[in-house]
Amino acid sequence: MMHQVSGEWIEKWLTGWSVSRGLPLPEQWQSGYKVKVGQETQKERYVFPQLNNDFIRLAQSVDEPWIHLKVCASYEEFRDLIPERWQPQPQGYMMKSSVPMTTASGCIGTDYSLNVTEHKPDSFIVNIRYRKTEQAAIGRLIIIDGLAVYDRIRTESNHQRKGLATLMMKSLESIALSKGITAGLLVATEQGKPLYESLGWEMYSVYTSVLIPEVINPLKESGSNKLK
């Protein structure tokens, strides 16, 4: 891990993540945080700012599938400390920004239109549509106690490489700046990380996820096929 990650920032980010999805707010769980997600493939998620015994002991005690454990550390740091049933997921990167983005505001062709909606207090959705009907890109900004959480940013595959992602980020940033907020946090994928870096974002920490996938019983699978 590059440096000490702020537990306060992680709690704010996770709160924004939860608000963005209409989920219960995170609860303190020992040195980390817990969200009751309640989805079939994500029952709960635990997020830890640092790799420590709380994370290791939790991984050793949980054996049911679809519990997501997340920590600001690389998989190599704890791979040999947790049971083999835990499988790593695609690498994530916690990114931070404390100054306005370095690129000029983008522009889009006349076929695209941009709309900003305040979904709930301090929770905004920016939607870019193609010819007013087709969603081309979408992103969300949630403001939590002076921190701008950028979340669920996506450009549809057939609208990529047209500057929409940059325009989306600048539009979300303009909302934050209008509230006097420059500090931002997001989690990037391997594919999205270069874009954010080109806009002046810096990597705050690696963000690693592990889970226990559901194991299908071959005998049960065979029996179910006979009934079809």
Image (cartoon, rainbow, N blue to C red):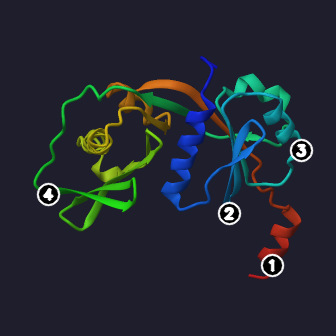
Which quadrant would residue 202 be assigned to in this image? top left
> Which residue is rendered at x = 72% and y = 24% of the image?
76
How far is the residue under mark 3 from the one under mark 1?
36 Å
> Of residues 223 and 109, which is closer to you in this image?
109
Give the label, 2 or 4, closer to the camera: 2
Amino acid bearing label 1: Lys
Amino acid bearing label 2: Gly
Alpha-carbon neighbours of circle 4 within 10 Å: few (<14), some, or many (≥20)? few
* Residue 24 vertical position relative to residue 163 in the rendered view, above or below: below
Which residue corresponds to mark 2? Answer: 38
| Quadrant placement of the C terminus | bottom right
Residue 115, image x, y percentages: 24, 58
> Which residue is rendered at x = 73% and y = 28% of the image?
51
SS label for mark 3:
helix
Which residue corresponds to mark 3? Answer: 61
Which residue corresponds to mark 1? Answer: 226
Disc on res. 111: 4
Q: How many numbered marks appear?
A: 4
How far is the residue under mark 4 from the one under mark 1?
52 Å
